[in-house]
Amino acid sequence: MESPKVKTFALVVLVLVSSDLVWGAQTTGLPSGWVETSGPAGSAPDDQHLPCATYSENEWQVSAHGSDLRIVDIGSGKRVDDPLPAHFVRTKEMQGRANAVKVDDGWLIGFDGGQFGGGLWGTDAEGRQSRQLTGENVRVILRRGQEALVLTGLAHMDSDHGAIFSYRPASGGAGDFVRIADLGSAPAAATFRSGGALLIAAEARVLELTADNQLHVVLQNGGMSLLFPNSIVEGKDGSIFVGMRFYVLELHRTEDHPYEASWFVRSRCVRTKISDFRCVCVGGSSDK
């Protein structure tokens, strides 16, 4: 079988972070060491990589550092709680990882315990008094001016749903907490792009929420739900990069379509096999 075509990009910087290799490149593409391949189709017969990728130990996280795109293998590292207010008391209803964001009237503290539950609480500045705002699992909280955007959802078994809420603080009283959009899939990561729109990497799709709360689906791909997207970033030229298990996804603008998807794997992983419930790379792009 002919190897996928290799896209070559200039390597800008190679650094070490926490004993992991981090590759830096111009944000117009991926660095050397990556090759374009067929993307996950959503079922084993449709794609040679997807069955093996679900067993991969590589979890690629993308981030922007100035004009550089960086890709880090975070492995199976457990996400830690955000720092909580000094006097906040966590109760048994507050399951899973904690997200905490300071707002003008105190704190928003969200929890995500997967199938075991979660929720969002608003507290005063010291965390002494709190009230529950929703019982939905909180995946991401971000500030947007004086407002906070709260992304909720759950992907478990055959269920995959998500929503986005707006919280507006109120002096001397409860803030305004309203649902503004249905995401159609559980959000995993989000970031603001240069123009103010919010990019969202969900379990099975990539979305964009405009500054006036219009939601657009940039990409729909059911195979992503098996690869656990973990990060999303905007490139210098407006491209979108999503990090996940085994793959890195690039969405770039074209003349004929708003975005075109390109899927990348490490060059040594053009051919793979499953061994002892692990995805093993057995061939690179330069192999005959």
Image (cartoon, grey):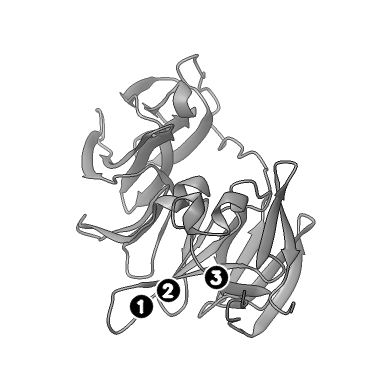
Q: Residue at x 40, y 20 (%)?
A: 129
Residue 239: mark in rendering: 2
- Which circle's residue, 1 or 2, is located before the other in the chain? 2
Q: Nearer the viewer, mark 3 or mark 2?
A: 3
Query: Which secondary structure, mark 2?
Result: loop
Whichever of callouts 1 and 3 sits on the residue coming sooner in the sequence is 3
Label 3 – label 2 distance at C-alpha: 18 Å
Is residue 283 left or right of 24 when viewed as pictured?
A: right
Dot 1 and dot 2 residues touching (CB under 8 Å)? yes
Q: Is residue 276 visible?
A: yes
The image shows residue 173 at horizontal and vertical percentages of 24, 28
Q: Which residue is mark 3?
A: 37
Please tell me which residue is depicted at 47% across the width and 77% down the height of the picture: 236
Q: Secondary structure at mark 1?
A: loop
Q: Nearer the viewer, residue 137 or 142?
A: 137
Write down the residue under mark 1: 253
Say what amino acid the circle numbered 2 marks. Answer: Ser
First in sequence, mark 3 or 2: give its number: 3
Which of the 4 image quarters holds residue 125? top left
Q: Please say if 219 is above or below 132.
A: below
Task: Tell me the quarter of the image containing the C terminus.
Answer: bottom right
Give the residue type that dot 3 points to: Thr
The quadrant of the rendering that contains the N terminus is bottom right
Q: CA distance from mark 1 to mark 3?
A: 18 Å
Which residue is found at the position 69% from the left and 74% from the top?
33
Amino acid beneath label 1: Arg
Q: Nearer the viewer, mark 1 or mark 3?
A: 3
Residue 256 in picture, x, y percent from top left: 27, 82
Local crowd size for mark 2, using a 10 Å CA cut-off: few (<14), some (14–19), many (≥20): some
